[in-house]
């Protein structure tokens, strides 16, 4: 993966994966890779929360498209290793962050359950 083409987003066109669409594929280290990405998400990469939720809920019926989605995430991680966020409060009178939350009922193709999303801005 070190010589792979770098991508700028953690998810691409693969974000609408379904359990029902794809046949079983050959053995891949899918579970191990998802666990490793999840560990990184919990420890230092909250921007991966959405894509980790997508790839972890489709573990029942894996196909080659699911593996390609994981490789996309790994390509994003390789390209974003040196980046980071640092929030600094500029004045004591104002809040340093502003956050927004929303829910989406369309993204979960299989069950149509709500998927929350969030974003924070530095003021």
Image (spheres, grey):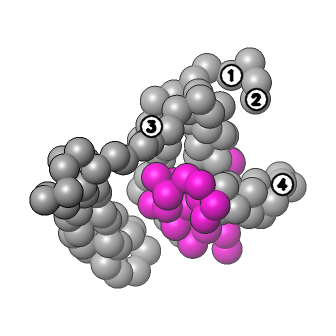
**Label disc, if present, on residue 34 of the rendered structure:** none
Residue 68 appearing in the image = no
**Label disc, if present, on residue 29 of the rendered structure:** 4
What residue sits 59% from the left and 43% below the top? 73
Q: Earlier in the sequence, mark 2 or mark 3?
A: 2
Describe residue 68's horizontal placement relative to residue 18 as left or right. right
SS type, badge 4: loop
Q: CA distance from mark 1 to mark 3?
A: 15 Å
Compared with 103, 15 (above or below) is above
**Label disc, if present, on residue 1 of the rendered structure:** 2
Residue 93 appearing in the image = yes
Q: How many marks?
A: 4
CB atoms of marks 2 and 1 within 8 Å: yes
Q: CA distance from mark 2 to mark 3?
A: 16 Å
Please identify the quadrant where the N terminus is shown: top right
- Mark 1, residue position: 4
Q: Earlier in the sequence, mark 1 or mark 3?
A: 1
Describe residue 73's horizontal placement relative to residue 123 as left or right. right
Question: Which region is colored magenta?
Answer: 41-67
SS type, badge 2: loop
């Amino acid at each position: 993966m070190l010589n792979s083409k770098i991508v700028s987003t953690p998810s691409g066109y693969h974000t609408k994966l379904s359990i029902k669409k794809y046949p079983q594929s050959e053995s891949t280290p899918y579970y191990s890779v998802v666990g490793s990405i999840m560990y990184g998400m919990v420890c230092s990469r909250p921007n991966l929360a959405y894509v980790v939720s997508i790839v972890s809920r489709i573990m029942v019926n894996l196909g080659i498209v699911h593996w390609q989605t994981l490789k996309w995430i790994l390509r994003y991680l390789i390209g974003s290793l040196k980046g980071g966020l640092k929030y600094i409060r500029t004045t004591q009178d104002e809040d340093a962050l502003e956050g927004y939350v929303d829910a989406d009922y369309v993204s979960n193709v299989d069950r149509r359950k709500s998927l929350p999303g969030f974003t924070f801005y530095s003021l």
